Amino acid sequence: MQDFDWSGANRRADGFLWALQQRRHLLTAVACAALLAACGGSDDGDAQVPPPTVSQSATATLAVLETTDLHFNVRSYDYFKLAEDKTYGFERTATLIRQARKEFANTLLVDNGDTIQGTALADYEAEVKPIPCSQQLSMYKAMGALSFDAGTLGNHEFNYGLPFLNQVLGGGLNVDGVDAGQKCAGNGYPAVLANVYSSKTQKPLVQPYAVLERTLVARGSDGKEVKLPIKIGVIGFTTPGIMNWDKRFLEGKVYTEGAVESAQKYLPELRAKGADVVVALLHGGMDGSAYSATMENPGLHLSKVAGIDAMVMGHQHSVFPDLSAKPAYSQAGVDNQAGTVNGVPAVMASSWGKALGVIQLPLQWDGKKWSVVKTGSKSELRNIQNKDAAGSAVFVDADPAIAPLIETQHQAAISYVKTPIGSTDFRMSTLFADVGDPGAIQIVNQAQQAYVANYIKSSLPQYANLPVLSVSAPFKSGFQGGKDFTDVAAGPMAIYNAADLYLYPNTVYAVKVNGADVKDWLEAAAQRFNQIDVNKTTEQQLISIFPGYNFDMFTTADMQYEIDVTQPKGSRIKNLSYLGKPIDKAQEFIIATNNYRATSGASFIPKLNGSSTIWASPDANRDVVIEYVRKNPQITRAVNGAAKSWRFAKVTTAGPVIFSSGVDAMSVAQAAALTGVSLSAADDGSGKGMAKYQIDFSK
Ligand code: MN
Ligand code: MG
């Protein structure tokens, strides 16, 4: 579909492009009259375009290309670490898009939402120094270089409010609080969304669907190449959770409908307008539960609505199809081999530009219109990170056209993340988190706890009587060596420091468990330690191979427990109490954690398999920490770094118990009042820049 002008000012959501093509023929003819020598041949593709009615049968392949959940990752750059990270970034996905366009004569490039939020650059352009009406967001500017055909809106498109959304989409949102007459630079491609309505007009907030008129390069039954017109319908759906997540912006102004209801309403309309092929853009994924109009991931149900030829998914930041041994989706109706969901060709292209989703749709022309041969489709992900023959990671090159487009804004965002958001009166580190210093973990728990408690209060009243607690772990605890610890110096705290406090791009999840589960959860976490033999006179290593990021802990006076490392695993948690009394095994708690623990923590307790999740929030734990510091900018040891939920059970050992941590760090242990810790050797001999410390459990 690169045979003529797909890009720039001539691209439109509707309007018949044959007219444009005819005009180009005219221009070509005029040019040839003046420059006859240069136009002698007839190999100009345009000159051979047949009229739009070809009675013979023909076949073609349409490659639907999907980006999803880009989250404003234009560059392969981590604004928290202030360093390149080649594992993600649209500048590399762009290369995959260009490759696919070379490979396939006919492509449809769509974006599946969660596009304008997610990096410091996004916050910079929305909130810090808002992008003017006359300019495109950097994300859209970069996408413009690849000429997207259409896109839908994710939940995160609503994060900055409706006036901002109206501006960055170019204007036209007829909704309370928005200047409907505003005309701005816009996003550069048609945005479609069928299940969010303006309360003011009772009409969809943006167009529910678009009919894209294109020309397909096809093969006629005579074996010759022919160009034939096609109408491609695109329809979008987002998660109804926006009404909770962005309640302050949306309440009373918009309302949502279930994806299935919206599809049933608009698909017949879309077909009636002549769409030969319909591609559904679902900013949602798949969930095996029964359908409801507010469900977050209705892909299994949407796929069953008649009239959808292909479905691109997202929101869950997962992958489909997934040919690994443990595929992300395995519900009834999901076919990872065929790349179909209830027979509908489908794809989910990870997140942050890590992959390009590709669905090859075989099309059949019957002389008048096109239809899709669904059984012949092929769905796949093309990743920016691959392995070479030796098994080493190799990355797709960045498209050199992208970075220069946003360089000024990129540099401005880097300056922005270096600006202070608060200050801390103590060194927040995980150097001694394994032996009881909550200094870098308590703030994460405080932020997660406040965030979940606030949400329950506003949106989940059925849980309002349950205590809300939080667990987190020392994500950086020396695995890579002496520098691999969270370590935020006392003094001003900048936004990028939050990455040190919360390493992973997880999102906050809340689970409902009982007192017995809490005990089992903590028992699992206590596998961080080897079993110590009190009678052994030789040196014993305290820390096991169980990863530090799994050493979940509470950091609150309300929940108290001891860890007895002389006991076998599973029998180490002693004197577990809640509010000063032995914990009631039946008492229910809401625990704030992350998406990983909530959905794949079954080795901790079986119900951490997703079944106990009461809220899968859309926000990153790291962003929640940043917001917490912004609201509580004076971080102190007393309030944010001294609440120990646990201590080692008092025991006397015949020999030394040792562990490794960063060099020259005794002052950190002392500041955390860890009286049993002493320096054993300035170098632990590992060659990883670590010192050896000793712990006396009798102190
Ligand atoms: Mn997302
Ligand atoms: Mg989303």
Image (spheres, rainbow, N blue to C red):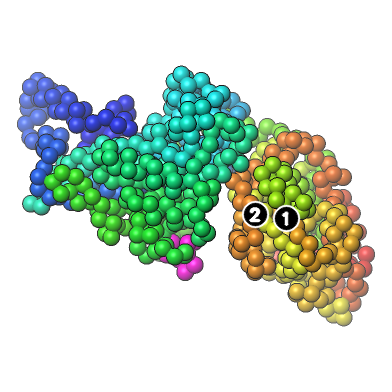
Image coords of residue 179 (percent x, y): 51, 20
The span picked out in magenta is 322-329
Instruction: Tell me how many marks there are.
Output: 2
SS class, disc 2: strand
Image coords of residue 158 (percent x, y): 55, 35
Q: Is residue 427 above or below residue 550?
A: above
Q: Let me know if residue 458 is in the magenta part.
A: no
User: Residue 614 shows which numbered tag?
Assistant: 2
Residue sitting at x 52%, y 51%: 292
Q: Is residue 179 left or right of residue 62?
A: right
Q: Let me know if residue 326 is in the magenta part.
A: yes
Q: Is residue 192 visible?
A: yes
Instruction: Determine if the C-beta at disc 2 is less than 8 A from ligand 2.
Output: no
Q: Amino acid at mark 2?
A: Ile
Q: Main secondary structure of the magenta part?
A: loop
SS class, disc 1: strand
Q: Dot 2 surroundings within 10 Å: few (below 14), some, or many (20 or more)?
A: some
Residue sitting at x 29%, y 27%: 10
Q: Is residue 243 left or right of residue 518?
A: left
Alpha carbons under labels 2 and 1: distance apart:
8 Å
Q: Is residue 33 above or below residue 195?
A: above
Q: Is residue 46 left or right of residue 675?
A: left
Residue that extends furthest to the right in the rendered view of this protein: 699
Residue sitting at x 23%, y 31%: 17
Whether residues under marks 2 and 1 lie with C-beta atoms below 8 angstroms apart, the answer is yes
Along the line of sight, the residue nearer the viewer: 122 or 465: 465
Q: Dot 1 surroundings within 10 Å: few (below 14), some, or many (20 or more)?
A: many
- Reading the image, the residue beneath label 1 is 590
